[in-house]
Image: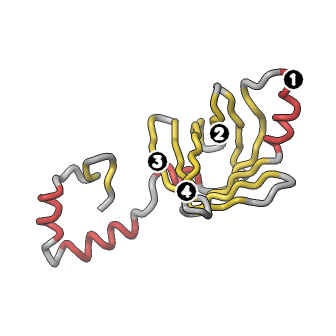
């Protein structure tokens, strides 16, 4: 059963959901429902390729270099896999999960090859633009590939 925070999505207590899932008629229906509804809504919203477009809140002396770096950046989301591509660097891929969502702020946890997790903070502006929040109010603006 999908869990959000400490309560089930359906709002049932664990005791009530366990009681209902013991029924033979409900078990196949629940399995089908869970398999059809997989993926977090934000995961579906991120799906696809995003290209770096610009940067925000960088010092003037760093702006040209940061913008050039941002324009070489690409995020690709495919199912539960995230790939980060940056010019002149090897691609990095890993399974990701939605760690938290608050309004348009999304925190991703991305599994590294050694099993540790990196955290990425995104702001979902709309269906065509996201911002990768780097800290100190700095951000990379990415636009969806059409």
Looking at marks 2 and 4 on the same chain, the residue that comes earlier in the sequence is marked by: 4
Residue 27 spot, x, y in % from top left? 22, 74
Residue neighbourhood size for the residue with mark 3, other residues' Cα within 10 Å, grouped as few (<14), some (14–19), many (≥20): few
- Secondary structure beneath dot 3 equals strand
Frontmost residue, 89 versus 104: 89
Q: Which tag is nearer the camera, tag 4 or tag 3? A: 4
Question: Of the residues under marks 3 and 2, which one precedes in the sequence?
Answer: 3
Alpha-carbon span between mark 2 and mark 4: 20 Å
Mark 3, residue position: 99
For residue 125, what is the image quadrant?
top right
Residue 116: image tag:
4
**Residue count near mark 4 (Cα–Cα under 10 Å), binned few <14, some 14–19, many ≥20:** few
Which structural element holds mark 1? Answer: helix
Circle 1 is placed at which residue position?
61
The image shows residue 127, relative to residue 82, as above or below, that is: above
Q: Select label 2 or label 4 by which is in front.
A: 4
* Residue displayed at 53% across by 51% down: 109
The reply to whether callout 3 and callout 2 are in contact (CB within 8 Å) is: no
- From the image, tell me which residue sits under label 2: 132
Whole-Å distance between the Cαs marked 4 and 3? 14 Å
- Number of marks present in the image shown: 4
Q: Is the N terminus in the top left, top right, bottom left or bottom right quadrant?
A: bottom left
């Amino acid at each position: 059963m999908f869990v959000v925070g400490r309560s089930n999505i359906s709002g049932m207590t664990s005791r009530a959901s366990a009681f209902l899932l013991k029924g033979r008629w409900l078990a196949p229906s629940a399995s089908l429902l869970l398999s059809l509804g997989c993926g977090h809504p934000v995961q579906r919203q991120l799906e696809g390729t995003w290209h770096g477009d610009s940067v925000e809140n960088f010092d003037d002396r760093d702006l040209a270099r940061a913008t050039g770096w941002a324009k070489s950046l690409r995020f690709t989301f495919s199912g539960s896999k995230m790939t980060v591509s940056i010019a002149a660097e090897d691609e990095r891929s890993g399974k990701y999960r939605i760690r938290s969502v608050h309004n348009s702020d999304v925190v991703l946890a991305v599994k590294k090859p050694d099993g540790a997790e990196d955290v990425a903070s995104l702001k979902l502006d709309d269906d065509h633009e996201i911002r990768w929040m780097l800290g100190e109010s700095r951000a990379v603006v990415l636009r969806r590939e059409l």
